Image: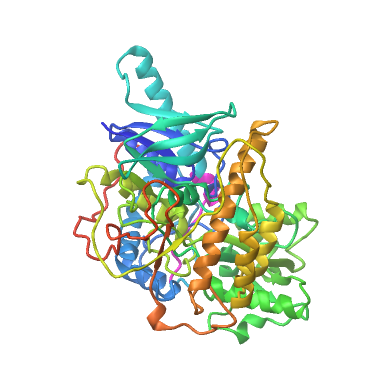
Amino acid sequence: MTRVLVVGSGLAGLIAAVRATDAGHQVTLVTKASLPESNTRYAQGGIAAAMFPGDSVDAHFLDTVRAGAGLCDPVAVRVLCSEGPARVRDLIRFGVDFDRDESGVTRGLEAAHSRSRVLHAGGDATGAAIEAALVATVRERAARAGSLRESGALAHRGLRIREHTMLIDLTVRDGRATGAVLLGPDGELHSTAADTVILATGGAGALYPHTTNPSVATGDGVAAAWRAGAAVADLEFYQFHPTALAVPGTPLVSEAVRGEGAVLRNVHGHRFMLDVHPGAELAPRDVVARSIAREMAVQKGAPVLLDATGLGRDLLERRFPTITAACREAGLDWAVEPIPVAPAAHYWMGGVHTDIWGRSSLPGLFAVGEVARTGAHGANRLASNSLLEAAVFADRAVRALRLPAGGPVHSGWTVSTVQRKTERDTTGPGTTVDRAALQRLMWESVGVLRSGDGLAAASVALEGMTMRPKPGSGVNMHLRAYEDANLLDLARATVAAARSREESRGAHHRSDFPESHPELARTVLWRLGGEYPGTDGTGDVRTMQSTTNLDDPTEAEEAIAC
């Protein structure tokens, strides 16, 4: 029996918790807010998998690699695409009711896909449907374990849930993750021991003022792993969704809307994407986002228009009820007039560097979902591969608990270090970083369009910011201070990564280096420089490198006890 601490309650965390519980481990599931609150809940488009006639794993593989702009790990992509159908069948067993039509399960087309292979539920409420089904499953497992413990039949195994509990830092002993320091709902710090920690904390949309992510997405897992000495990678690749509704709150307008036939127009009514890419509105996300940003610059910041009027009210309200409601709340009727849209921070391709079993460079630490950099997305994630990656690699992480300890040893990566200047004392005075100022800086200098001068200026500005979390007048103030410290750490690391990549590739575009260079098609691993236990400042990560030579079996197992 293994003590497993799962941090995060999106699709990746919930799958990991359920599968680890069913495998007989002692599982504690920790989440910063309430159990259903996560990035997964807000995912609209769907989940991509090669499950239909006329499609294939090979076709899905090729689409993913093309979108990844030369930086995908082909082994990770093969795992993602080949095991994806089994994971979707698991979700159906867990109670996810995907939309159906006369042919069976409905499939949609999204940007950069060569086939219609995206499954959705509730029209544009796929994430909410998946989250609800898995939350119910997790609560059932926890209730079952609680009953068995009370009866004496199960003293230590099973699943415990701790809501409103934030990850502060990982604990490391003798070069191995041994648990975590957590901020509980009582406002106090608590240490929790574990044999294995599985991070599933999502991304860091709160780095930017305009994001489709919920407010809990502050990069806590990536920041904690980095401080603990784990390698992180691809931080420069933050994907900006091309179409967020340009109203307060920036609600997402799914890629699937353009997949159904909606088009983008500038303020003069010109369909500008026809001039940019053969795929027009269904070009890769980075291409569409940059094109919109350029049009907005010409328009003095005014958003572009998404014209879905040709789809008809019936289709819009049936297929996209969530977006329809968001439009109505903003006083818009998208069935009769184009709606204003603009890019917003959406998904981090970078994160904790892992192998194809979710193992990080720090023994005992796994990362799954958006917090992880598996290599499956490369420099630009293919639409609707995010939910698939979360399910596939969360399942694999739990299966990896049966594998021999230790990570793979390979070679061929460039390694760099970043010094950490912030402090994490909880006593004494400190200057609180202004989150809004940090977000503006990141948007202007490390957003859709970047330049060497802007990145250099951002680096200097970030060096002048400090954060020392200290107890506030309530738990929420204390929690926000820790979040801000994480954001400052991640902002510095992201700027350093973006400065080091002197080319344009995927979601990373620099005006001073507008072309891609084949010799730079590599990943840079980043390690914290010598200020935390377990690091020596050298950035030596010889025990965690490419996944391409792993000989472990990759056949997909399907859940049998849903």
Q: Inspect this view and state whether residue 110 appears.
A: no
Question: Residue at (77%, 78%) from the top-left corner?
Answer: 299
Residue 61 in the image: state x and y as whole percent: 35, 69
What's the colour scheme? rainbow
Question: Residue at (45%, 49%) from the top-left corner?
Answer: 227
Choose between 522 and 10: the one closer to the eye: 522
Quadrant of the rendering where the C terminus is positioned: top left
Residue 167 in the image: state x and y as whole percent: 50, 39
Instruction: Please tell me whether residue 87 is drawn above or below residue 270 in the rendered image.
Output: above
Instruction: Examine the image and state in which quarter residue 80 appears.
Output: bottom left
Please tell me whether residue 111 belongs to the stretch shown in magenta: no
Choose between 197 and 161: the one closer to the eye: 197
Which residue is the extreme one toward the right? Answer: 331
Please tell me whether residue 121 belongs to the stretch shown in magenta: yes
Residue 177 in the image: state x and y as whole percent: 35, 42
Quadrant of the rendering where the N terminus is positioned: top left
Residue 284 in the image: state x and y as whole percent: 52, 73
User: Where does the magenta region start and end?
Assistant: 115-130
